[in-house]
Image (cartoon, rainbow, N blue to C red):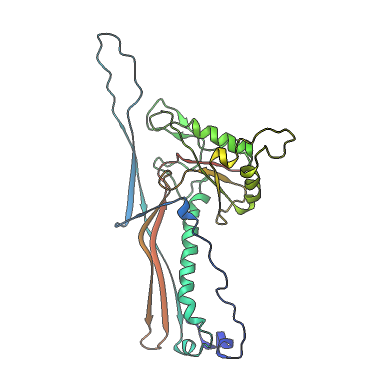
C-alpha cells in the first residue's frame, strides 16, 4: 500500500494557504521518571531474588551458635519484542507535494514511536492490580495485599490499601504508614520513602490541594496538613496513559523501585526505494521490554 497523488491532491496545488500537520509538540517523556533504562545484548533478560539470613536467636550458655542459610527464590524471564511501523509514497507524490508534508512523515514515525514507548511502559502500571500481563518473581501482582515472603514464618506483606481509599489526605497518610512498616524478604523492617505521587490528570486538582495547602483541606479547624509536599516529600507525576482516572500510586524513583525498561535496540530509522516503482519507503523500529522484579517501593490504591 502506498500514498498516491489522488489521495492528497490538494497538496499538489500551490494556492493552498494553510496545511495543518504536526502542529502540536510532544510533552516530556513520562515513563523515564519511573523506569530505570538498562541496555540488553540478549533476546531476553532473566532475574531472580535471594533472601538473606533470618533473625538472631537466643544462645544459652555452653551451646553452639545456630547457623542459617540464605534462601533462593524463583527465576523469571522477560523476552524482548520488536515494534515497527512503515510508510510508503509514490515517486510522483514525493515530487509533486508543494508543501513538503510527505517529507515530514519520517519525523512523524519518530513521534509515533515515542508515543508507543509510553504506552508500552505505562501498560505495566495499568496491569498493577490485575497481573494479567506483568507479574513478579513469585508470580504475584505488582500491587496486592498478600505478597509472599521467601523466608518461612515471616508472613505476607501488602503494598495496597484494602479496602481502597480515594486520593485524599487519609489515603496518603495510610500509604505513608504502610511504607514505614514494610518488611524486607527476611522480615526486617525497612524504611521506604515514596516521593512520587502517580496520578491520572483527572486527579491533578485534588493533588494540588493536598500537596500545596498548609492546613488540612476542607477542614474548619486550623490543623496542619500531614501530607503537604514539604513534609511528605511528594511530587505529582501526571500520566494520561493511565487507563484508570481514579487509581493512584506512591512510588520511589528509578533505581529505587524495580521498574525496568530493557533497551535491546533503540528506535532506528531507515529509508529505501522500490526498484520497480521508485516508491519511497520509510521504516522505524525498536526492540524493548518492560518488567518489574520486586514490589517494594511501589504502593497503590485501586479506587
Say whether residue 269 is left or right of residue 248: left
Q: Quadrant of residue 166?
A: top right
> Would you place residue 84 above or below residue 96 in this image?
above
- Give coordinates of residue 59: x percent, y percent: 30, 13
> Would you place residue 300 above or below residue 126 in this image?
above
Which residue is the extreme one toward the right?
Answer: 220
Nearer to the camera, 52 or 255: 255
> Would you place residue 268 above or below residue 214 in this image?
below
Say whether residue 36 is left or right of residue 24: left
Question: Which quadrant: the C terminus?
Answer: top right
**Residue at horizontal 47 percent and vertical 57 percent from the top:** 120
Q: Is residue 1 visible?
A: no
- Give coordinates of residue 88: x percent, y percent: 45, 80
Q: Is residue 230 visible?
A: yes
Nearer to the camera, 15 or 91: 15
- Give coordinates of residue 12: x percent, y percent: 55, 90
**Residue at horizontal 33 percent and vertical 51 percent from the top:** 45
Amino acid at each position: 500500500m502506498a500514498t498516491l497523488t489522488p489521495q492528497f491532491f490538494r497538496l499538489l496545488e500551490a494556492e493552498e494557504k494553510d496545511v495543518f500537520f504536526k502542529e502540536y509538540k510532544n510533552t516530556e517523556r513520562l515513563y523515564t521518571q519511573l523506569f530505570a533504562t538498562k541496555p540488553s545484548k540478549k533476546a531476553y533478560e532473566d532475574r531472580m531474588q535471594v533472601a538473606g539470613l533470618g533473625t538472631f536467636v537466643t544462645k544459652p550458655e555452653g551451646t553452639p551458635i545456630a547457623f542459617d542459610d540464605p534462601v533462593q527464590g524463583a527465576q523469571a524471564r522477560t523476552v524482548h519484542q520488536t515494534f515497527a511501523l512503515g510508510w510508503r509514497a509514490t515517486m510522483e507524490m514525493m515530487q509533486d507535494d508543494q508543501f513538503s508534508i510527505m517529507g515530514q512523515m519520517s519525523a512523524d514515525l519518530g513521534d509515533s514511536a515515542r508515543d508507543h514507548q509510553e504506552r508500552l511502559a505505562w501498560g505495566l502500571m495499568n496491569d498493577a492490580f490485575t497481573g494479567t500481563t506483568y507479574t513478579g518473581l513469585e508470580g504475584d501482582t505488582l500491587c496486592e495485599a498478600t505478597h509472599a515472603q521467601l523466608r518461612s514464618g515471616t508472613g505476607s506483606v501488602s503494598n495496597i490499601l484494602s479496602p481502597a481509599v480515594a486520593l485524599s489526605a487519609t489515603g496518603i497518610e495510610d500509604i505513608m504508614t504502610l511504607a514505614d512498616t514494610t518488611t524486607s524478604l527476611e522480615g526486617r523492617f525497612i524504611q521506604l520513602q515514596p516521593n512520587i505521587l502517580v496520578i491520572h490528570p483527572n486527579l491533578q486538582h485534588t493533588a494540588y490541594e493536598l500537596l500545596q495547602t498548609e492546613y488540612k483541606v476542607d477542614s474548619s479547624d486550623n490543623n496542619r496538613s500531614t501530607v503537604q509536599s514539604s513534609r511528605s516529600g511528594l511530587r505529582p507525576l501526571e500520566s494520561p496513559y493511565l487507563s484508570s482516572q481514579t487509581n493512584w500510586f506512591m512510588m520511589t524513583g528509578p533505581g529505587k523501585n524495580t521498574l525496568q525498561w530493557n533497551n535491546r535496540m533503540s528506535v532506528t530509522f531507515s529509508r529505501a526505494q522500490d526498484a520497480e516503482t521508485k516508491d519511497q519507503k520509510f521504516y522505524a523500529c525498536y526492540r524493548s521490554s518492560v518488567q518489574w522484579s520486586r514490589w517494594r517501593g511501589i504502593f497503590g490504591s485501586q479506587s
